[in-house]
Amino acid sequence: MSDTTASLRRKIDSAGDLQSVVRTMKAMAASNIGQYEQAVRALGDYYRSVELGLSVCFRKSAPTAPAVEGKERSDPRFLDAVVFGSDQGLVGRFNDLVTDYAVKSLAAMPGKHRVWAVGERVHARLTDAGLPLMGVFGVPNSVRGITPLVGQILVECEARHSKGEFTELHLFYNRPTSRAAYAPVSQRLLPLDEGWQLKLARLPWPTGNLPEVMGETTATLRALIREYLFISLFRACAESLSSENASRLAAMQRADKNIDELLEDLNGAFHRLRQSKIDEELFDVMSGFEALSVEEK
């Protein structure tokens, strides 16, 4: 009986230690969500400013200006994709959702597919799905780590362009829909074709003042396009990381709840067993007392 009580006590102690770890990870996930959400919000106004700048440039030049690289073509030879996933566990179906969405979406798109994965886990899932993998990038572990990743992706794009390859570039990632929920989305980043230019050219100017491009329009346009590509990639990565931590936070909340229920059951069993032991000892004392009483008579 005492061995069983000791075993229950060890289980209770182990569950308590595990709960401490889970709550620490839950706090870290909640903290990480904050920094990525803040980064996305900060990019929002800047992204809008870049779009307005591009709008002014396109109003002053033909939509098919040679400064915009990658004119619209009817038959692209290659279709490149970047799939943002996770390098760590405890994220539920985070990698499965974005992989399934990417596989389904790419199957409906013409062209020769070439896929880059962000994260070892999503890389493994994309390999299992039979997609042609060109490489894998590491997942940033902070907001500061996003910029080097974006630089690597842009270098790959420039290398393809320098070889004269016309490509489409699509981004696949999970986007937060609420504090603890997310959904897979996609964005076509390249080519910057006539349709994209016309859409920006029609953006309404937010004030009554007439906008004007200072300096050479072509140089300004090129600079704004570089910013547009950078911000789009940065935001996709930040939203993916925010979703990853939201998934981990939800998983830790479920684990914390399950451990609470387990501790309640274990403590109940421990107290019942201890009370049973006390009752047996009391019965032994009472039986011994009654036996002595009979002998005295």
Image: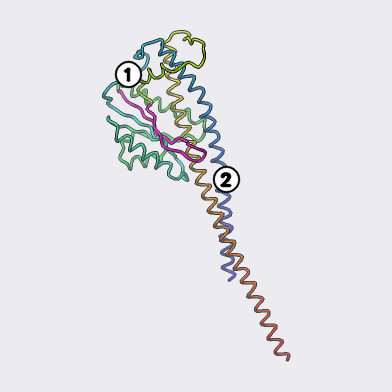
- Magenta span main SS: strand
* Label 1, residues with CA under 10 Å away: few <14, some 14-19, many ≥20: some
Residue matched to label 1: 71
Residue 175 in the image: x percent, y percent?
Answer: 45, 35
- Residue at (33% x, 35% y) in the render: 105
Q: Is residue 175 magenta?
A: yes
In the rendered image, which quarter is residue 197 located in? top left
Q: Which of 264 and 198 is in front in this view?
A: 198
* Label 2, residues with CA under 10 Å away: few <14, some 14-19, many ≥20: few
The quarter in which the N terminus is drawn is: bottom right
Q: Residue furthest top?
A: 215
Judged from the image, the secondary structure of the residue bearing numbered disc 1 is: loop
Judged from the image, the secondary structure of the residue bearing numbered disc 2 is: helix
Q: Residue furthest right?
A: 296
Residue 24 is labelled as 2
Q: In this view, does 2 lie to the left or right of 139?
A: right
Residue 26 in the image: x percent, y percent?
Answer: 55, 44
Q: Residue furthest front?
A: 208
Q: Is residue 292 magenta?
A: no
Magenta extent: 166-188
